[in-house]
Amino acid sequence: MTVDEASRSYHRQMIRYYDGPKYSFDWDDVRQSYVDDESNLTADRQRIVTELHDTFSGRNVLEIASGGGRWTAHIAQTAESVLATDTSGQVLNIGRSLVTARNVKFLQCDAFDSGKLEGSFDAAFHFNFINHVPYSDWSRLLEQIHSKLDPGSVVVMGGQLYRGSESHDGLNYHSEYDCSDGVHYKLIDNIPDGGQVASLVGHLVKDLEFSVRSGWWARYSVP
């Protein structure tokens, strides 16, 4: 199997996992978890929300892997508009039910096909997505996203502070799951550090900043 074929196979597996088996198809419980989480924001998370309000104020934001709209709702409070995209129709339906702001639109779209979206944006956001993508695919993914962004656009990305327990190359770490659909899933769970982020995306961006708080975070602008 070539590298490209392996990447496509992994990406299909990741989509299948997040479109149902991860949640054992109990979508009502998933929806309630979003409601519960947002009613009990930690002080650190509230600081991050405030920073996102400032960063995206007045901007047209492209959100990648928006899930059920956990971050969408916060970004929409100050943004001019938000296009929230995800490959999973199931989680997008949760987002549509929870985020009713008039400046938000939800759209089913593969992140690696972002370049096919209509229009352009001056900001982008994604959280807890790229840490599940092989490091070898980061440039390809971000080039797609950046192709829809105006020069000078700001991008914020981040992920959870959880690393898988297995690694075959000393770089990408994996977690394994046996799910309700009877399939065994092996998914990437990485925690990149500032040096890795700089080496992977530094040639694509400017003004790169990296921090670790309740999650890892990177912010940069597009040339």
Image (cartoon, grey):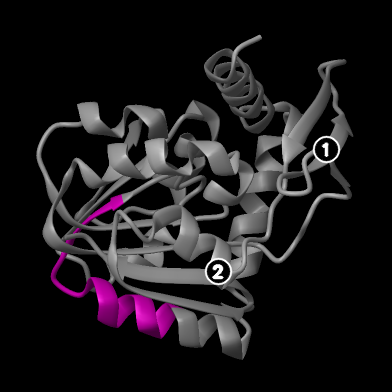
Q: Specify which label sits upstream in the sequence, 2 or 1.
A: 1
Between 70 and 14, the one nearer to me in the picture: 14
Return the x and y of residue 3 as percentages of the image width and height.
58, 20
Q: Is residue 62 left or right of residue 187?
A: left
Between 101 and 152, the one nearer to me in the picture: 152
Amino acid of disc 1: His
Which quadrant holds residue 221?
bottom left
**Picture layout, residue 46 above or below residue 121:** below
Q: Looking at the figure, which quarter contains the C terminus?
A: bottom left
Q: Looking at the figure, which quarter contains the N terminus?
A: top right
Which mark, by number, is residue 199? none
Between 113 and 77, the one nearer to me in the picture: 113
At a point 72% along the width and 29% down the height, the residue shown is 25
Return the x and y of residue 75 as percentages of the image width and height.
33, 66
Q: Which residues are magenta?
A: 49-62
Residue neighbourhood size for the residue with mark 1, other residues' Cα within 10 Å, grouped as few (<14), some (14–19), many (≥20): few
Q: Secondary structure at mark 1?
A: loop
Figure disc tally: 2
Residue 11 is a magenta residue: no
- For residue 192, say whether it is visible: yes
Q: Secondary structure at mark 2?
A: helix
Q: Is residue 99 left or right of residue 195?
A: left
At a point 33% along the width and 27% down the height, the residue shown is 113
Amino acid of disc 2: Gly
Give the Cα separation between the discs numbered 2 and 1: 21 Å
**Picture layout, residue 130 above or below residue 159:** above
Return the x and y of residue 206 as percentages of the image width and height.
26, 68
Residue 56 is a magenta residue: yes
At a point 60% along the width and 13% down the height, the residue shown is 2
> Label 2: which residue?
195
> Label 1: which residue?
168
